[in-house]
Image (tube, grey):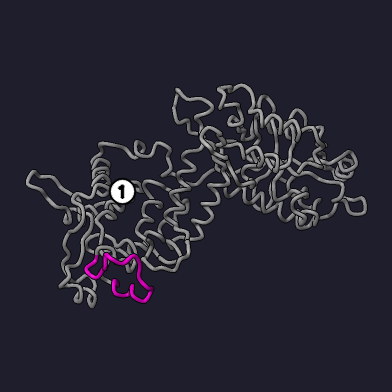
Amino acid sequence: RGDKTNHGLPELNASSIGMAKAALEAMNELDLFGGRGGLPSVIHVLADEAQKCHAVLESLLPRESNSKEVDASLLSIISFPAFAVESRELIKVTRDEIKTKLQGRYGCKRFLRDGYKTAREDPRRLYYEPSELKAFENIECEWPLFYCYLILDGLFYGDDEAVEEYAEKLDALLIKTEDGLRLVPEMYAVPGHLVESEYRRPHSQERIPIGSLPFMWAQSLYTVGRLLKEGFIAPGELDPLNRRLCTEKKPDVVVQVVILAEDEKVKERMAQHDLAVQTIEEASPLEVQPARLLSNLYTYLGQNEKLSLSGRISKEVGILATSKLYSLQGRIFAFTPQNLDRLNFYIVNDVNLMASNFRSAVHMLKSNWRELGRPTLTLIMYRQFLENDKVPLSIISTLKKIKSGYLHGTRVVFGNLEDFLSTSCISNLTFLANIEDGDNENLNPAVRLFLEHELSRPFFVRR
C-alpha cells in the first residue's frame, strides 16, 4: 500500500529492486536438484538483467521510492540477507539516513507518516489523501524488528560497538515469559490517550507492545543474531555465496578487444596503420554473429508448451551478454554488441559517435563485469566506415589506444578471437536442448530450424 495515498501511480521501490538483484545474481547457473540435476534444472540469468537492477538501485538510494524518502526495509538490502549494494559509501549514507529519520526508543519506524496500527488509523479506509497523512507524523509505530537487522548488520561488518548498542536496546524491549523465554513483539504503539502529547513532543511518551507476540519474522532474526554473536554459527554459514564481500576491492577487469574486417579491402586499409586484423571468415573455428541472433535464441529460455510458458519476451541483450563466448553443440559463437549494430542503430554509421560508444562500452564492462573469465568485445569494421577509401582518424586513434593497453582508464588487450579462447568467459546454451522430449543431446526442433535458416545467410543481411 506504500504510504496509503491513492495517487494511482506505480513506483519503483529500492528495497524490492535490491532483493530482485540479489536473487538474480544468486540464482544464476543454480541447479535446482544439485548433484541429481541436469540440463533442464539449471537456472539461466542474463547478467544485463541484474546490472539494470544495480543501476536503478544505486540511482535511487538512499531514497526508497517516489513517495517514501526512506524506509527501514532498506536495511535488508544494504546488509543481511541480500547484500545488494556494492558501494561502502552508499551503504553508510543509507544506514545513517535510516537511523537519523526512523530510529526511536522502541525500534525503527517503517517509513515517515506510516499510520499502520496507530491510534489515529481508520481501519475501514483503504487510503488517505496526502494532506491527511500529517496526522500520523511523530506517532508512527516503532518496530523492534529493525533493531534485529541492525545487530546483524554490525555482526557481518564487524562493528562490535553497534552490536552491543542495539543488543542492549533490544533486550529492554523483549517480553519475558514465565518460562524464561524472550519474545520479540511486532511493534510498539503510542496509546490513544497519549497521542497528542507524543505528537507535540516526539519520543516523550511510553509506548505499549501490540500485534503478534512473538512476531516470528523478528524472532527468527533475533535468534540468528544471538547464534552469530555467541559463536555458534559463522557468517559464512549464513552467506555461503560470500555476498557480504561484495564491497571488497576487486581485481581490475581486463577487456579483450577483437576487431574484424568486413572484407580483404578493409583488412588491407587497417594494415596500412600497423593494425593487423582478421576478416569475419578468418575468425574460424569461432563463428561471429550479430546480437539479434543471440536475442532470438534467448526467447527459447523458459519456453514450455506443456506448462503454457512462452519464454523470454524481451529481445534486448546488453553489452554484458554479448561480451561472452557461447558454446552450442561443439560450436563456439561470438556476438557483436547490440548497440553497435549498424542495421538496427543508424547512429553507428557516424564513425566518430561509434568510436565514442565503443569507449563507453569498454568502461561499462570495467565497472559491471562480475563473471568468471574476461569479457571479449567484438567489433566489425565495415567498408562503409572508410572515408575516401581511408580508415577515419577517430577509429585509428581509438585502436592505437587499445594497442597501448589502456582505453578510457581500462586495461585492454588487442588480439584475435582464437587467442582469447582460454581466457574468455564461455557460457553453454544448454536450455536450447530438446528438453520436453527428454532429448538433451539434440537441439529443440524449432531452434534447429531457426539456426539453419539464419546461419545459411550472409552475416550482413541477417535481421
Q: Which residue is mark 1?
A: 152
Along the horizontal axis of the image, is 419 left or right of 197? right
Element on which disc 1 rests: helix
Q: Residue furthest right?
A: 388
Percent position of residue 295, x then y:
66, 42
Percent position of residue 222, x then y:
24, 47
Residue 133 within the magenta-colored segment of the rendering = yes
Q: Quadrant of the C terminus?
A: top right
Along the horizontal axis of the image, is 115 left or right of 318? left
Percent position of residue 32, x then y:
45, 31
Question: Chief secondary structure of the magenta span?
Answer: loop
Looking at the rendered structure, the kind of residue marked 1 is: Leu
Q: Residue at x 51, y 35 (%)?
A: 307
Q: Which residues are magenta?
A: 118-137
Q: Residue at x 36, y 76 (%)?
A: 131
**Callout 1 environment at 10 Å: few (<14), some (14 to 19), or many (20+)?**
many
Along the horizontal axis of the image, is 221 left or right of 14? left
Q: Is residue 161 in sight in this rendering? A: no
Q: Name above or below for residue 447 compared with residue 316.
A: above
Q: In terms of image quadrants, where is residue 201? A: bottom left
